[in-house]
Image (cartoon, grey):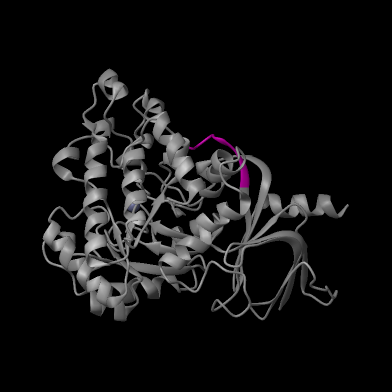
């Protein structure tokens, strides 16, 4: 099988390549790439990529697949299908399942299901639980989990309150050369809260989660990273103060990286006026100042990654009073559109830097063979085509994910992943062939 991607804008941050050119994919591998690649008309398919970005398959380092234990919210099958439709060819799945991913058997289970025929065809990189049963008390057998195939450990959903437990985990991970993905939340400050502390929470009379709940734990984990020399990845930074902590930690030489998520550069706590639980997330939506400074920190490189924090819930779980609703929103299928609309088109990020945050950087942080278009660097070719100018309305009823909980339903977006290849084609957008045939006329 030979596929030729012709005349697209090739954006490969792994080699800083940004040129108009061609990509030849042969026998599931990238054979040739560049602005001087000659095309012969012997391919099985030639795709005219005029106006499209040709990027390495996108990598989401923060997805909740909900299996095992909560397949009413999402399954590995539906979650990986959603990933493919969002342009992702690799996703890292979080360990706060039921039971938590704290044994090699559970890691085997995830890997088996992810490669089953009905799944979305993307690579799933499991993240192991940092402590036994996610209780925050005893560090899990991380060496055994690493042998089973985890790419990191995390306390996602169950932030480690005990600093000694976190220190021990960092010492183990430093020896094992595994990153820790840290959920930074000081529970004594955030407990019972459901939105950002400020004028809006006072107006609505909702119990707040102060920004210090996030920032104190970011600071603690950055300091522990500095002193243990462990690679710590700070998950979903949402405040300017947390950004400053990460900036200082990097300056001091700590092995710290961090991510943010689309809701933290696209939405503020002011959008919560109608008590819609789809806006409820942790950390909570912050202020316009935070949104501006998150965009700046993405541009200056302090924030390395844009991750979806795809957090599906069943309808009946979300259709309850705001205080009782669970935290989180789905994100895999809106991530590219929201990112291009709120960051790239307004000029905060160049196209190459956008792709770096969505593909190359997360691949490098998790040491994955992904995030590059260089021939021979990945087990199979992983390529996403993005139409940066496509204007569309995000309709959650047309998504693959079981979770329909999102504040972006009905949002007009500009930019979309329209074709995803992971070895073979795993997603082709409805708009794709319509628009291609128009181009060919
Ligand atoms: Zn999460």
Residue 193 in which image quadrant: top left
Which residue, as the protein is rendered here, is positioned at the far top? 203
| Residue 183, percent from left and from top | 27, 53
- Depth order, front residue of 95/80: 95
Task: Tell me if residue 413 is in the magenta stretch.
Answer: yes
Residue 180 in which image quadrant: bottom left
Is 98 left, or right, of 50 in this rendering?
left
State whether residue 331 is above or below residue 124: above
| Residue 432 visible (yes or no) | yes
The span shown in magenta is 408-415
| Residue 50, percent from left and from top | 78, 55
Identify the residue at image location x=41%, y=40%. Answer: 264
Identify the residue at image location x=34%, y=63%. Answer: 255
Residue 288 in which image quadrant: top left
Which residue, as the protein is rendered here, is positioned at the far right? 441
| Residue 205, percent from left and from top | 24, 21
In which quadrant will I find the N terminus?
bottom right
Is 231 left, or right, of 4 in this rendering?
left
| Residue 98 visible (yes or no) | no
Which residue, as the protein is rendered here, is positioned at the far front? 252
State whether residue 418 is above or below residue 279: below
């Amino acid at each position: 099988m030979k596929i030729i991607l012709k005349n697209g804008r090739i954006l490969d941050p792994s080699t800083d390549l940004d040129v108009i050119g061609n990509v030849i994919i042969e026998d599931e591998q990238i054979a040739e790439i560049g602005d001087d690649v000659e095309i012969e008309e012997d391919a099985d398919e030639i795709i005219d990529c005029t106006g499209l970005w040709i990027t390495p398959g996108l990598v989401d380092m923060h997805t909740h697949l909900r299996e095992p234990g909560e397949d009413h919210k999402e399954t590995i099958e539906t979650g990986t299908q959603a990933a493919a439709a969002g342009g992702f060819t690799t996703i890292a799945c979080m360990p706060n399942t039921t039971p938590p991913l704290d044994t090699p058997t559970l890691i085997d289970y995830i890997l088996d299901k992810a490669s089953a025929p009905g799944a979305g065809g993307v690579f799933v990189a499991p993240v192991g639980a940092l402590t036994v049963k996610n209780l925050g008390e005893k560090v899990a057998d991380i060496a055994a989990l690493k042998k089973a195939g985890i790419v990191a450990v995390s306390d996602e959903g169950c932030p480690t309150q005990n600093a000694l437990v976190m220190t021990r985990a960092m010492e183990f991970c430093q020896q094992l050369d595994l990153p820790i993905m840290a959920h930074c939340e000081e529970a004594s400050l955030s407990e019972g809260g459901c939105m950002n502390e400020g004028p809006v929470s006072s107006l609505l009379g909702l119990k707040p989660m102060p920004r210090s709940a996030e920032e104190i734990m970011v600071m603690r984990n950055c300091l522990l990273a500095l002193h243990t020399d462990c690679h710590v990845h700070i998950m979903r930074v949402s405040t300017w103060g947390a950004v400053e902590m990460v900036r200082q930690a990097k300056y001091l030489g700590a092995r710290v990286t961090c991510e943010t998520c689309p809701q933290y550069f696209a939405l503020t706590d002011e959008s919560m006026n109608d008590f819609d639980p789809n806006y409820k997330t942790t950390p909570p939506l912050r202020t316009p100042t935070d949104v501006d400074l998150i965009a700046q920190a993405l541009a200056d490189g302090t924030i390395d990654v844009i991750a979806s924090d795809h957090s599906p819930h069943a309808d009946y779980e979300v259709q309850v009073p705001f205080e009782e609703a669970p935290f989180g929103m789905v994100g895999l299928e809106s991530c590219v559109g929201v990112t291009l609309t709120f960051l790239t088109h307004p000029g905060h990020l160049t196209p190459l830097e956008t792709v770096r945050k969505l593909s190359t950087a997360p691949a490098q942080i998790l040491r994955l063979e992904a995030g590059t278009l260089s021939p021979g660097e990945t087990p199979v070719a992983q390529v996403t085509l993005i139409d940066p100018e496509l204007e569309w309305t995000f309709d959650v009823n047309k998504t693959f994910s079981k979770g329909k909980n999102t504040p972006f339903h009905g949002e007009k977006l500009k930019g979309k992943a329209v074709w995803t290849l992971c070895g073979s084609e795993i997603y082709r957008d409805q708009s794709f062939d319509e628009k291609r045939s128009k181009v060919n006329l």
